[in-house]
Amino acid sequence: MKFSTKQIHAGQHPEKTTGAVITPIFQTSTYSNEKLGETKGFDYGRTINPTRLALEANLASLENGKYGYCFSSGMAAVQTVINLFKPGDHILCTDNVYGGTYRLYEQVIKNFGLEFDYVDSSDFDKLKNAVKSNTKFIYVETPTNPMLNITDLKRLGEFAVSKKIITCVDNTFMSPYFQNPLDFGIDIVLHSTTKYINGHSDVIGGCLITSNTEISDKIKFLQNSIGSVPSPFDCWLILRSTKTLSQRMKAHNENAAAICEVLSGNKKINKVYYPGSKTHPQYDLAVSQMKGFGGIISIELGSFDNAVKFCNALNIFQIAESLGGVESLVCHPVSMTHGSVPKELRDKFGLTDGLVRLSVGIEDKEDLIEDIAGALIKV
Ligand SMILES: Cc1ncc(COP(=O)(O)O)c(C=O)c1O
């Protein structure tokens, strides 16, 4: 089956008692035993829920994976995946990782004896050289938030397999429509489903997908043991959203490409970061491993003052954290999403006070271009 067919049907069947086409919200915390010890395969809501199972099967199918697990947030998925490891294990992570992931690793997980190093994973030699004898896990975001640096997934997959290191790719920015890391030999894919997968800015969620049975069994155990599971209603909302994922992603991509072109010619902008731009230093790699470039564009406006003027002058783009929804948003990463990343690390990868991140929605592109052009006049 192709993607748009899978997004509508995978994991879902007409409901047995009524034939309802849409998977119902099984809003129950527990299930009755017909006789003591005789269940229909469902015992307790944290452990198993039919609406969640449908979503998990749907997302696994979209990522070309065998097993899917859903969580109450993207961060709950990150927390769960890191619990695969133990004190003394060394973990390598992309330096320009989402600020919340960095905070979790540095301020929470480190207290439990795991070691972390942050490396520019877009430079494969740097990544390889940072591996130590106790490296057990490589956690990569590609493209990164918000610098849109790209890691070579094929090389990473081959290298990690040869070293018996488990890999996880945060695929939030691309969605399963534009990039499928498991196809390149990556072990685990992570999404903040809050973003493109749900796409309507009304749910917080996360997921982990794998085809490795041993890893899957461990994640299933952790999902039940830790218990950061999503509600049946949130699963139902996300399942509704995946039915339009390919159409939304195409629209995000088309709008972002048009906006990138306009931005690139504007003298008020020092630099435009977008993987679909031929000026992106890793454009060829992007083309080789992604089927599209998504809706996130970062721009360098030169100073905090300019960033503030630009954000405040926008009308359609709303100033807000998050990304990947149908509506266009603008964010100032230093003061919003990446505030917990130390300045010296931010400086290393170019996350300056003048950087602004656009999450291009699916409104009419002419309106979005007019909005940006109007705001740039104020800079
Ligand atoms: C790339 C990326 N990964 C993970 C997360 C965390 O997801 P959540 O906010 O759903 O916990 C975010 C949130 O912005 C993100 O941008």
Image: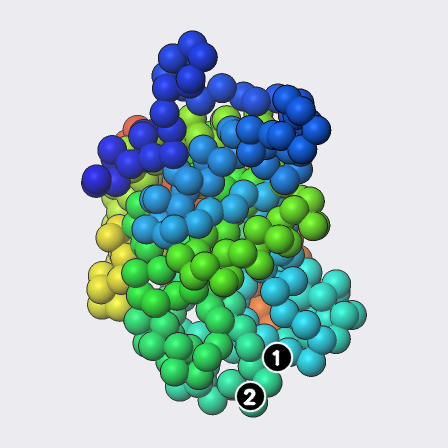
Q: Residue sitting at 37 percent across and 52 percent down? A: 65
**Residue kind at label 2, given as amino acid type:** Lys
Inspect this view and state whether residue 219 appears: yes
Which numbered disc, 2 or 1, marks the residue that appears first in the sequence?
Answer: 1
Q: How many marks?
A: 2
Determine crowd level at label 1: few under 14, some 14-19, many 20+ residues with C-alpha closer than 10 A.
many
**Residue kind at label 1, given as amino acid type:** His
- In the image, residue 345 above or below residue 318: below
Coordinates of residue 270 in the picture (x, y in percent) = 40, 62
- In the image, residue 324 above or below residue 94: above
Q: How is the image coloured?
A: rainbow
Most extreme residue toward the front is 35
Most extreme residue toward the top is 18
Most extreme residue toward the right is 111
Q: Quadrant of residue 300?
A: bottom left
Alpha carbons under labels 2 and 1: distance apart: 7 Å
Inspect this view and state whether residue 297 appears: no
Coordinates of residue 319 in the picture (x, y in percent) = 55, 38
Determine which residue is flagged by label 2. 132
Coordinates of residue 248 in the picture (x, y in percent) = 33, 34
Determine crowd level at label 2: few under 14, some 14-19, many 20+ residues with C-alpha closer than 10 A.
few
Determine which residue is flagged by label 1. 90
Q: Are marks 2 and 1 in contact (CB under 8 Å)?
A: yes
Depth order, front residue of 169/347: 169
Does dot 1 land on a helix, a strand or a loop? strand
- In the image, residue 262 above or below residue 242: below
Does dot 2 land on a helix, a strand or a loop? loop
In the picture provided, is 276 more to the left or to the right than 28?
left
Depth order, front residue of 340/18: 18
Coordinates of residue 367 in the picture (x, y in percent) = 33, 30
